[in-house]
Amino acid sequence: MNKMLKQVQQTQDDMMKAQEQLKDEEVEASAGGGMVTVKMSGDRELKEVHIDPSALGDDVSAEDLEMLQDTLVAAVNEASRSAEELASRKLGGLSGGLGDLGLPGMPGV
């Protein structure tokens, strides 16, 4: 039993390290043919938003602004999904099915 608890603790420590490492990794996504690009860390922190100046033009209409806002939302959502996939790849193999036990820090994978 003591050996099993040590293994669980080691797995939790490994997961915490992996979560910290995710902060240093970035994903990037774009939408609208590259008109809007966002960068987000592996822990889902939005790092950068770049809007191509040509997207705004000289006289931006309300419709153009709405389209740009919708495109920005799509880009942020895509980066968020990519970050979730990165976290799953980094943390998925570490839990070894322990997430089903409901232990703190052990997400079900």
Image: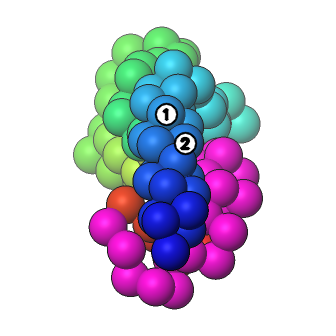
- Residue 4 covered by magenta stretch: no
Indicate the position of residue 40 as horizontal and vertical percent values: 47, 32
Element type at marker 2? helix
Q: Which quadrant holds the C terminus?
A: bottom right
The residue sitting at 51% across, 86% down in the picture is 100
Compared with 54, 92 (above or below) is below
Q: Is the residue under label 1 in contact with that under label 2 (CB below 8 Å)?
A: yes
Determine whether, in the image, residue 22 is placed left or right of residue 48.
right
Residue at which label 1 appears:
17
Compared with 11, 37 (above or below) is above
Compared with 61, 97 (above or below) is below
Element type at marker 1? helix
Q: Callout 2 environment at 10 Å: few (<14), some (14 to 19), or many (20+)? A: some
Indicate the position of residue 64 as horizontal and vertical percent values: 40, 42
The residue sitting at 36% across, 35% down in the picture is 45
The residue sitting at 37% across, 74% down in the picture is 103
Q: Visible in this render: residue 77?
A: no
Distance in Å between CA atoms under marks 2 and 1: 5 Å
- Magenta: main secondary structure: helix
Residue at which label 2 appears:
14
| Quadrant hosting residue 4 | bottom right
The residue sitting at 46% across, 85% down in the picture is 101
Boundaries of the magenta span:
81-104
Q: Visible in this render: residue 9?
A: yes
> For the residue marked with disc 1, what is the amino acid?
Lys
> For the residue marked with disc 2, what is the amino acid?
Asp
Which residue occupies the foreground of this view, 86 or 51? 86
